[in-house]
Image (spheres, rainbow, N blue to C red):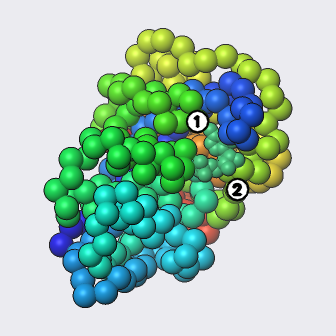
């Protein structure tokens, strides 16, 4: 049995540079990964099966729309490997929330199937599968802190911030990435600066924050809740929202903020984690 973690990703910065003729946007982003997320389990089986478990399983529409089954189909067509498999997705990350849940699941499925069939994880065809499944899937397949360009698929590894305590907060509003990009104002506010990862993050921004707030105004409250407790190094929205995150110097500071926010907002999703 293969157990493959599908860690959440956050965008420490996300700069939108241009609208493209293919409907996508040219971006520059700092991808980082958490030590927590969903879990994919894969095993050889007598027939194809897909199971869901975990707190957010009910929020997925069903196997047909699920990126996990799409990833498995694409993998098997690409590598011409059609033996039946049983795949279980243990869903802990909220759906459509800017932390790459579906992309992480798809990437973990590709990694897990590659392990099952002894295919090297750096096989170019695996990257091509990821690229075809979504803009964030190549970064999730790579799984390491990186500067992403293009629509997010051109990746360069960066070091820094590993072990940093992080708090994620989501108000329960699912936000469509396509809808948020559609209301971006078209202004190029510049690329990601040079320097250490923390300096680049602090000098950066998330250009999707303003458009996402017009769709889900509650994002303002989420950012304020994170800013109101302790002394976080950085507070920002991730991806196209609505999840926001804060980075802290110490775990105790993060834990105290989490306790206070949970008491104020018992219905919001709140996860204490660490940058990988
Ligand atoms: O690539 P993915 O399917 O995850 O993207 C979802 C939608 O988000 C796209 O259809 C597109 O409208 C928008 N998008 C974009 N530019 C990107 C990534 C996503 O416009 N770089």
Measured as percent of width and height from the top left, residue 263 is found at 56, 63
Mark 1 neighbour class, 10 Å CA radius: few under 14, some 14 to 19, many 20 or more: some
From the viewer's side, name the closer residue of 201 and 246.
Answer: 201
Q: Can I make out residue 217 in this image?
A: no
Measured as percent of width and height from the top left, residue 155 is found at 43, 30
Q: Look at the numbered disc 1 and say if its residue's Cβ is closer than 8 Å to ligand 1.
A: yes
Residue sticking out furthest to the front: 80
Above or below residue 1? Residue 260 is above
- Placement of the C terminus among the 4 image quadrants: top left
- Placement of the N terminus among the 4 image quadrants: bottom left
User: What's the residue at 37%, 83% (across, down)?
Assistant: 49
- Counting residues from the N terminus, which is met first, the one under dot 2 or under dot 1? 1
Above or below residue 83? Residue 183 is above
SS for tag 2?
Answer: loop
Mark 2 neighbour class, 10 Å CA radius: few under 14, some 14 to 19, many 20 or more: some
| Residue on which disc 1 sits | 151
Is residue 31 toward the left or the right of residue 118 in the image?
right
Measured as percent of width and height from the top left, residue 228 is found at 61, 42
| Residue on which disc 2 sits | 176
Q: Look at the numbered disc 2 and say if its residue's Cβ is closer than 8 Å to ligand 1.
A: yes
Measured as percent of width and height from the top left, residue 210 is found at 77, 38
């Amino acid at each position: 049995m293969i157990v493959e973690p599908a860690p959440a990703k956050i965008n420490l910065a996300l700069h939108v540079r241009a609208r493209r003729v293919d409907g996508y946007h040219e971006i520059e982003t700092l991808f980082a990964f958490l030590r927590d997320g969903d879990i994919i389990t894969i095993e050889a089986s007598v027939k194809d099966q897909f199971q869901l478990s975990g707190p957010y399983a009910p929020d997925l529409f069903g196997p047909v729309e699920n990126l996990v089954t799409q990833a498995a189909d694409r993998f098997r067509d690409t590598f011409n490997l059609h033996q039946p498999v049983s795949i279980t997705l243990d869903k802990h990350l909220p759906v459509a929330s800017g932390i790459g849940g579906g992309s992480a699941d798809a990437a973990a499925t590709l990694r897990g199937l590659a392990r099952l069939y002894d295919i090297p994880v750096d096989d170019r065809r695996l990257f091509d599968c990821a690229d075809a499944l979504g803009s964030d899937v190549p970064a999730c397949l790579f799984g390491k802190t990186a500067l992403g360009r293009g629509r997010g698929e051109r990746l360069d590894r960066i070091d820094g911030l590993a072990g940093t305590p992080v708090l994620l907060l989501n108000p329960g509003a699912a936000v469509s990435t396509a809808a948020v990009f559609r209301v971006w104002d078209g202004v190029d506010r510049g690329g990601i600066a040079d320097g250490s990862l923390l300096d680049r993050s602090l000098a950066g921004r998330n250009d999707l924050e303003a458009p996402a707030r017009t769709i889900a105004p509650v994002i303002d409250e989420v950012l304020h809740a994170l800013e109101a407790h302790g002394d976080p190094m950085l507070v920002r929205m991730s991806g196209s929202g609505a999840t926001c995150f804060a980075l802290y110097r110490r775990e105790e500071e993060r834990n105290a903020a989490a306790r206070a926010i949970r008491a104020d907002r018992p219905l919001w999703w709140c996860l204490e984690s660490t940058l990988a």
